[in-house]
Amino acid sequence: MDNEPAAAATSHDLVAARLLDAAYARAPLALFDFPLADVEPEKDRLAVLKVAADLLVKARLAKFDDEGRTSLLITNAGRYWALHGGYLAFLKEEPIAMGSGRGRNPEMEALRSEYMRLRLNTFWWSFGLSVAGFVLSIVSVIIAIFFGDRLLR
């Protein structure tokens, strides 16, 4: 059963899975010293390793340990996934929404959107009425300055 995602995974994903396991076993992992026998030309081997390492870093399962980006250090999330099935299990996992640990209900999202729209409308109406009140007060002050002496007689 666990081999089914491996059949659909790309070669970069498979190399990333091997890199994650190796980084878990020994850290930091020298990226370009990693043995990769199934890719023959040295240039292709280095390119595949670089793409696989970039996949791990982008997924925040590992980070580069040096400025030259040649050493890979596993993160806490990487340790978790190395213990719970590796990179291929991470790819199978259902993504969760950022900011919450549980999935959101579509009805609640629609309700939240409707209330946000109502709040924004209320804000703009109150802002407009505040501006109108300010303008009326300025007009009242101008009338008092220019015509106040006539009105007091």
Image (cartoon, grey):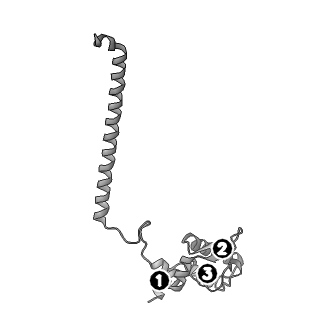
Q: Secondary structure at mark 3?
A: helix
Q: Residue at x 31, y 58 (%)?
A: 112
Q: Quick check: marks 3 and 2 in contact, CB under 8 Å?
A: no
| Residue 146 relative to residue 23: left or right | left
Callout 2 amino acid: Ala
Callout 3 amino acid: Leu
**Which label sits on residue 5?**
1
The x, y position of residue 80, in whole percent, is 52, 81
43 or 77, which is in the foreground?
A: 77
The x, y position of residue 60, in whole percent, is 56, 72
The x, y position of residue 99, in whole percent, is 43, 65
Labels 3 and 2: the sequence-earlier one: 3
Question: Which quadrant holds residue 134?
Answer: top left
Between the residue at mark 2 and the residue at mark 1, the CA separation in whole angstroms equals 23 Å
Q: Residues within 10 Å of mark 2 (few under 14, many from 20)?
A: few
**Which label sits on residue 19?**
3
Q: Secondary structure at mark 1?
A: helix
Q: Which residue is mark 2?
A: 47
